Image (cartoon, grey):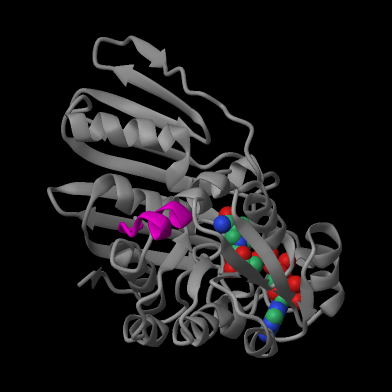
Amino acid sequence: MGVEMKIAIVGCGGIAKVHAECIHQLENLDMIAYADIKTERARNFADQYGGKVYNTLEEMLEKEKIDALHICTPHYLHVPMAVYALERGIHVFMEKPPVISASQFNELQAVKSDKRLGICFQNRYNPSIIQVKKMISSGETGKINGVRGIVNWSRSKEYYTESGWRGNLATEGGGVLINQSIHTLDLLAYLLGTPVSVDATMTNHHLKGVIEVEDMMEAYIRFEGDKIACFYATTAYCADVPPLIELSCENMTIRIEDLDVTCYYKDGESKKLQIEHKTKLGKSYWGAGHMDCITDYYDSIEKNRPFSLDLNHLNDTILLLLRTYESARTGKEISIR
Ligand SMILES: NC(=O)c1ccc[n+]([C@@H]2O[C@H](COP(=O)([O-])OP(=O)(O)OC[C@H]3O[C@@H](n4cnc5c(N)ncnc54)[C@H](O)[C@@H]3O)[C@@H](O)[C@H]2O)c1
């Protein structure tokens, strides 16, 4: 980065470590403050990277002059914290999900600020996704007819009970869809275009009586241009395996598993694409694109150009997320717009 910026992080838990390491590795970004209600967590960051420690976001923003805030708190706090910072003239880079309700979406859209809101859908930066997106845009794949999106992960009782916020509707906003498989849902919208309608069901298979939210979501999604998606996500599996995205296209079937892409052609031949596997921060099965995503966010600020993960660009993903829950709650097929 050419311009020096002062950065703070709010919420110093698991994912904040990945943000801090990315910021630390980027030139001209100076991490000066950390806030967490568990102050010792903020202290750990300050010990490692330098900077001041705060208990609340409000106190941190009152005492420190910062240019950008990274929000790594539980889901229900993303929007109120983003609004608070944007209205005070601070750029915001926020973890997913962007919102947990339609009213939060309205609130975020109504913010008046000339500062930049970026949302962390880092899987769009996976080399596998970049490669497949190019193949679709160039016409190499031919028309897309449909896609399977499948996420099988394992989340234990303790993962929820020890967190203080996961598993509760009011603080997590939902379960496997809004938390673990939101990246795969986003990639379906990114690769297939505008969603038209969704028909979904959800249930809780393995943690009845422990969590209020779903551990399984399945959805049948129609997209413009006669494309369909069959989506299935669960946290009741016995292991964390890479999400599968398989596109059925006119000229080929493309299977994306984590960073691997294989093309299956009509004549029975298949080819695994040579895709560079750079060492990245973060767990691979989440998608390990935080570094590229955060670099692009700050580059967009420096060059005063649009950032592809702002609220406008994510409109389809957010509507698809909210409507999928609406469909699963009501048992009805729901139009996206
Ligand atoms: N992009 C990804 O792939 C990815 C991966 C993991 C987590 N996440 C997201 O990151 C966010 C945080 O997840 P996590 O796993 O790090 O959770 P976590 O529970 O480990 O960390 C959250 C932190 O926020 C702190 N906190 C809670 N309320 C606060 C408040 N009012 N003020 C200040 N701090 C507060 C907690 O004390 C905790 O340290 C979630 O939105 C999650 O969905 C994204």
Depth check: give the residue in front, 150 or 106.
Answer: 106
Above or below residue 52? Residue 186 is above
How many labels, in total? 0
Viewer-side residue, 170 vs 229: 170
Toward the viewer: 52 or 334? 52
Q: Is residue 33 visible?
A: yes
Counting from the top left corner in percent of width and height, residue 263 is at 36, 21
Name the side, left or right, on which 228 lies relative to 8: left
Q: Please tell me whether residue 98 is drawn above or below residue 183 in the rendered image.
A: below
Residue at 22%, 27% (x, y): give it.
Answer: 141
The segment highlighted magenta reads 297-307
Query: Which residue is pictured at 56% across the width and 68% down the height?
Result: 175
Q: Is residue 302 magenta?
A: yes
Q: Main secondary structure of the magenta part?
A: helix
Residue 204 visible (yes or no) = no
**Residue 54, relative to residue 121: is it above or below?**
below
127 relative position to 285: left or right = left
**Quadrant position of residue 115:** bottom left
Q: Is residue 77 left or right of residue 135?
A: right
Whole-percent x, y for residue 282 in the image: 66, 46
